[in-house]
Amino acid sequence: LPIVGMEPAVKPAAESTATGIVGVFATAATFQGRLFESVVDRHASDVEVLTRACPEWVEIVESGKTTGHEVERVVSDAVAPLIQQGADVLVLGCTHFSFLRGVISEVAGEAVTVIDPTSAVAAQTERVSTGAHGSGLVQLAASGDLAEFTLLVPQLVDLKHAGVVLPFA
């Protein structure tokens, strides 16, 4: 099976910044990986890239919360320092963070561009799966509690044809 991963959209951020400062939100594991370092080296050597690990954003999304005062506070705690340092483009580098995009955009303000690469990931998934002769059934995998994940998915996305949730080790 083809696998499509999430790569923070540093290249379009570097190309569109007016201040020369971009912010990237992801998990600590993303920032520790060689891939992220390589993307920055290749596409953002002439801009300042501020990084912020946001494990609390993952926790909030996994609790089913994507709006409200608590969400706004947690998002603001991470976004405000990057804006204060001059970032005018923010990159969402984790699939969880797309669910917070509205709040992130609101907190960041109209002068800040938020880049969410999930549409590009979806388009690439469609490209690599064309001709894969699959069943057409969406199958989800979770590394955590399967029952909890099964309850969470309908709160976040409208998947009318979701199939079983598989364990992902």
Image: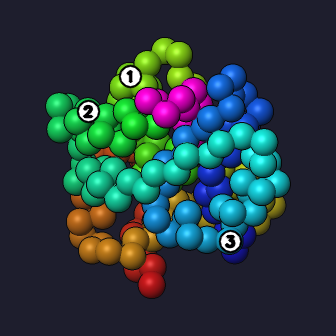
Amino acid at dot 2? Glu
Residue at point 65% right, 42% down?
48
Q: Answer whether residue 102 is visible to the viewer in this image.
A: no
Q: How many angstroms separate mark 2 from mark 3 (CA)?
A: 32 Å
Q: Which residue is mark 2?
A: 72
Q: Amino acid at mark 1?
A: Glu
Describe the element under mark 1 as helix, strand or loop: helix
Q: Which residue does the numbered mark 3 point to in the structure image?
A: 34
In terms of depth relative to the viewer, which is nearer, 21 or 66?
A: 21
Residue indicated by mark 1: 106
Label 2, residues with CA under 10 Å away: few <14, some 14-19, many ≥20? some
Residue drawn at the location 46% of the way across and 51% of the way down? 52
Q: Please tell me whether residue 131 is drawn above or below residue 159 in the rendered image.
A: below
Measuring from the top left, give residue 106's x and y in whole percent: 38, 22
- Please provide percent x and percent y for residue 2: 72, 69
What residue range appears in magenta? 83-91
Q: Is residue 90 magenta?
A: yes
Mark 3 falls on what kind of element?
helix
Residue at the extreme front? 85
User: Is 95 located above or below residue 143 in the figure?
Assistant: above
Q: Quadrant of residue 71?
A: top left
